[in-house]
Image (tube, rainbow, N blue to C red):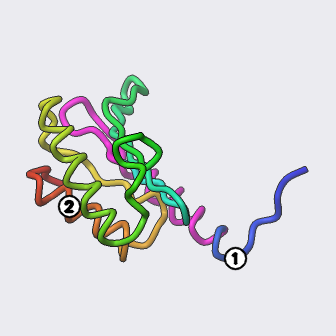
Amino acid sequence: MLKKMNDKDRRRLHRKIHIRKTVSGTPERPRMTITRSNRNLSVQVVDDTVGRTLASISTLEKEFSTIRPTVEGAAKLGEAFGERLKEKKIAKVVFDRNGYLYHGVVKAFADGARKAGIEF
């Protein structure tokens, strides 16, 4: 049986679908997508032409398990992910906020990645 969606989830899903119509990752500029919950934060960089994840980071990883999905934690995770992308020689990405509002944790992560030298 399908789970009934509340209005907040339904609005996010519509935003997500609308964004994904235009945002797509290429080998030169892969798509960075963020997923957040009350307990964790996870980010992937995806090349949509072949459907492959090039890099990822999550608060579920052992070294980042102490980071909570707060604004401060997201900024630290963004900087760490920026360094990880530099090691893989990825300097430019397309940011996919995954239907979340560009505010708070999502904005802090993006700013942290920019601080590490990643261009959006």
Structural crowding at the residue carrying mark 1, measured as other residues with C-alpha within 10 Å and reported as few (<14), some (14–19) or many (≥20): few
Between discs 1 and 2, the one toward the N terminus: 1
- Badges 1 and 2: C-beta atoms under 8 Å apart? no
**Magenta segment includes 14:** yes
Q: Seen from this angle, which residue lies furthest right? A: 1
Q: How far apart are the alpha carbons under marks 1 and 2?
A: 31 Å
Secondary element type, mark 1? helix
Q: Is residue 28 above or below residue 98?
A: above
- Residue at 33%, 64% in the rendered image: 73
Q: Give the range drawn in magenta.
A: 10-32
Most foreground residue, 65 or 120: 65
The quadrant holding residue 41 is bottom left
Q: Is residue 47 rendered to the left or right of residue 27?
A: right
Residue 11: horizontal and vertical position, in percent? 60, 72
Secondary element type, mark 2? helix
Numbered circle sitting on residue 118:
none
Numbered circle sitting on residue 112:
2
Residue 14: horizontal and vertical position, in percent? 58, 64
Label 1 sits on residue: 7
Q: In this view, does 101 lie above or below 22?
A: below
The quadrant holding residue 85 is top left
- Residue at 18%, 33% in the rendered image: 28
**Magenta segment includes 58:** no
What amino acid is at disc 2?
Gly
Most foreground residue, 99 or 106: 106
What amino acid is at disc 1?
Asp
Q: Is residue 74 rendered to the left or right of residue 40?
A: left
Q: Is residue 13 above or below residue 1?
A: below
Q: Seen from this angle, which residue lies furthest left? A: 117
